[in-house]
Amino acid sequence: MMILHGHWRSLAAMRVRIALALKGIAYREVSVDILGGAQFDPAYLAVNPQAVVPALETGDGGPPLFQSLAILEWLEETHPTPALLPADPRGRARVRGLAQILAADTHPLLVPRIRERLGSQFGADEAAIAAWSREWMARGLGAVEERIARDGISGAWCHGDAPGMADLCLYGVVGGYKQRGGTLDALPNIARIAALCDADERFAAAQPMRQPGAPKA
Amino acid sequence: MMILHGHWRSLAAMRVRIALALKGIAYREVSVDILGGAQFDPAYLAVNPQAVVPALETGDGGPPLFQSLAILEWLEETHPTPALLPADPRGRARVRGLAQILAADTHPLLVPRIRERLGSQFGADEAAIAAWSREWMARGLGAVEERIARDGISGAWCHGDAPGMADLCLYGVVGGYKQRGGTLDALPNIARIAALCDADERFAAAQPMRQPGAPKA
């Protein structure tokens, strides 16, 4: 059985959780206490020397996979049904581009090591760090909203009428944005897709607050 | 002919430039003056509403592609020879993971919009911003070095004996790191790969300081 090394709050682990659910792959999750520094334990560094989550043990004895988007691509190549990417190269590029606006240009700006550094290097307090995080999520979500509104080729989801790699990246950022006081009022396409995610247990069950270890509401 | 919208200093545009050279694809580059705000001109927003480079017009009349790693994947799918990813899914996951350590977890922390925000929100001066950038590049390069040293499956390059998607991401970060005073003394595998890049015009000609618009020496 596959083993996902994650953490309740990690939006990157959440992406993999959703992909595993969409593809119907059995796995168990091991929580790495990122907020408590457990990613630096030698036992975890043996799993992922970068000291971040997620990592995925694939159950075949090979070394754990690392980096969420690389894991998603591996899942897509080895468990192709249902597909998380469209079949045509241009469509695949669009979905990957949307995913990367969120997973490369947005989320890495908000992770614990960045928040810690903003405090230690610049003296940022909790409110300033929240404002920083909200700003980058607003920009990332705004860029995706603009793309969806303008491209005119999204269906119900980011690309067509089935959920895919962009949607599962989007759902995590939407959750983080709302948690820090952001609203989707000016982002109607994203609000529509987020509502579809909320109504789909394969997405909703992957949310941070529904994971073991999360604080009670 | 393909048109790459780039900027001399952009490490993300540099990645695409190298991939186009490795694959022997003819293109011309249009410079978008990111430091002067030209990414917000309506003409460029029509190319890429996210207001970032690179974007790639593919010459077939379709909408421009966006996000460097999505562009690299599109190039790989449509122009498969020479390959920038290995053939096996696990190897592909490793190369994509290495690329993402640099292109998702490292480089987005250093781009002009972040440097601007560090100044405007936290009053960071040039030296503080350089220290911030150097820190994240050191961590990203350190993670890649650790992987290469430990995995024991790299050849001359990051993965095997031909250059690929991880190497072209690596070369840009190495250049940025050295430019900000970093050294590769503790990173022998990366130093070896960077030397291979320096000696290969397909890599070396893509460097920021060799682009039109770059300051003299």
Image (cartoon, coloured by chain):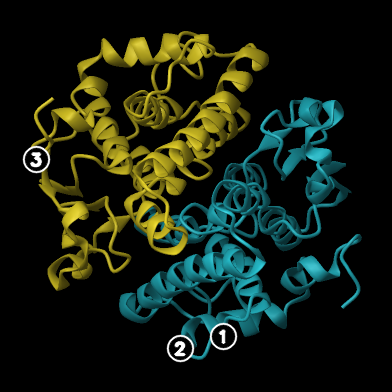
Chain colours: A yellow, B cyan
Quarter location, residue B53: top right
For label 2, the SS is: loop
Q: Which residue is mark 2?
A: B186
Label 1: chain letter = B
Q: Quadrant of the N terminus of chain B?
A: top right
For label 1, the crowd category at 10 Å Cα-Cα, with few meaning under 14, some 14 to 19 and many 20 or more, is few
Amino acid type, callout 2: Ala
Residue B82, numbered label: none
Which amino acid type is shown beneath numbered disc 3?
Gly
Q: Relative to B57, is A50 above or below?
A: below
The answer to whether marks 1 and 2 mark residues whose Cβ atoms lie closer than 8 Å is yes
Callouts 3 and 2 close, C-beta under 8 Å: no
Q: Provide residue A137's location: percent of width, then percent of height.
A: 48, 33
Identify the image quadrant of the C terminus of chain B. Answer: bottom right
Q: Is residue A114 above or below residue B172?
A: above
Identified at 52% across, 34% down, the residue is: A135
- Can you give x and y, in whole percent of width and height, for residue B74 in the image? 62, 41
Q: What chain is tagged by disc 2?
A: B
Q: Is residue B92 left or right of residue A21?
A: right
- Which residue was labeled with disc 1? B183
